[in-house]
Image (tube, grey):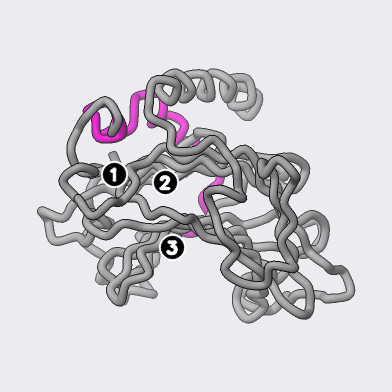
Amino acid sequence: MDNFIILALPLIFILHSVHISSASVVSTGNFNKDFFVTWSPNHVNTSADGRERSLELDQESGTGFASNDMFLFGQIDMPIKLVPGYSAGTVVAFYLTSDQPNHDEIDFEFLGNVSGQPYILQTNVFADGFDNREERIYLWFDPTKDFHTYSILWNLHQIVFMVDFVPIRTYRNYADKGVAYPRWQPMSIKVSLWDGSTWATRGGKDKVDWSKGPFRTSLRNYQIDACVWKGNARFCRGESLTNWWHKERFRSLSQTQRRWFKWVRKYHLIYDYCQDNKRFENNLPKECSLAKY
């Protein structure tokens, strides 16, 4: 099955590229033009052409950056190569956030590990200020050896988390059933590298070993294909040639995507809040009983 996955991944990328080529692309990857450093600029290194950037964590500080624009719906693809070797305690975060009191947020968090143990990819969704929607998977490759693309598709109907365009998680819009969904607040794109020793690896048992630092992660050739927020929600919420992500074909997973999704859930899922009855005292969130696609 794994060999089939590897052979079929290029086809998924080709299918993805077909619809991207006809869309209005906000940016194809100059970090200097599209982002600003939010903290510790001396821990950020960017190539001369602006297309590749590395972040560094040492005992002095981590670092991060954020987009100049805010967005309401779209797709963001971020190729990342994670911290190699001993990375326990480190957290690389790629996420969207509205930074409001009752904020919305869509998270990828990459949790480091001791040498020889796999990275954990944690995803989470905040809606109207509430989270507690964590899921965790092991990846089917070593994310420290090369760049892999981590994507967020966000539209009026669903949020899809993708790894190399394979859907690993969905969060559907069930607002009509009383489930909070990010649909009104524009969000900025943020990336950071920081010390999560208190919780990230085995619940905080394995911490950052500073003698093995500095720790570096790299990003390159990202793509932002999203509605830039200019104060008019109706413009971003409307279906149009530019807002391709709202079209009917993106309202749910395709049949092919559903097969990949089931494969990830069967072989790589290690934690799902919707299966954690103890945590929620046998009162799971409402969306847990609703369809994933």
Mark 2 and mark 1 in contact? Answer it, CB < 8 Å.
no
Position of the N terminus, as image quadrant, is: top right
Taking depth in this image into account, of 195 and 262 the one nearest to the observer is: 195
Residue that mark 2 sits on: 169
Q: Earlier in the sequence, mark 1 or mark 3?
A: 3
Residue 35 is situated, as x and y percent measured from the top left of the image, at 54, 54
Q: Position of residue 20 (x, y in %)?
A: 43, 25
What residue range appears in magenta? 244-272
Q: Residue at x 22, y 49 (%)?
A: 173
Label disc, if present, on residue 158 of the rendered structure: 1
For the C terminus, the quadrant is top left
Q: Main secondary structure of the magenta part?
A: helix
User: Is disc 1 placed on a helix, strand or loop?
Assistant: strand
User: Which of the two residues, 88 or 17, is positioned nearer the viewer here?
Assistant: 17
Say whether residue 32 is magenta. Answer: no
Q: Residues within 10 Å of mark 2 (few under 14, many from 20)?
A: many
**Label 1 – label 3 distance at C-alpha:** 17 Å
Residue type indicated by callout 2: Arg
Q: Is residue 248 left or right of residue 24?
A: left
For the residues labelled 3 and 2, the Cα–Cα distance comes to 11 Å
Residue at point 38% right, 31% down? Answer: 258
Residue 15 or 259: which is nearer the viewer? 15
Mark found first going from the N terminus, 3 or 2: 3
User: Circle 3 sits on which residue?
Assistant: 134
Select label 2 or label 1 by which is in front.
Answer: 1
In the rendered image, the vertical position of residue 153 relative to residue 207, given as above or below: above
Counting other residues with Cα less than 10 Å from the Cα at mark 1, is it few (<14), some (14-19), or many (20 or more)?
Answer: many
Q: Answer yes or no: is residue 51 visible.
A: yes
Examine the structure image and report whether residue 249 is included in the region drawn in magenta. yes
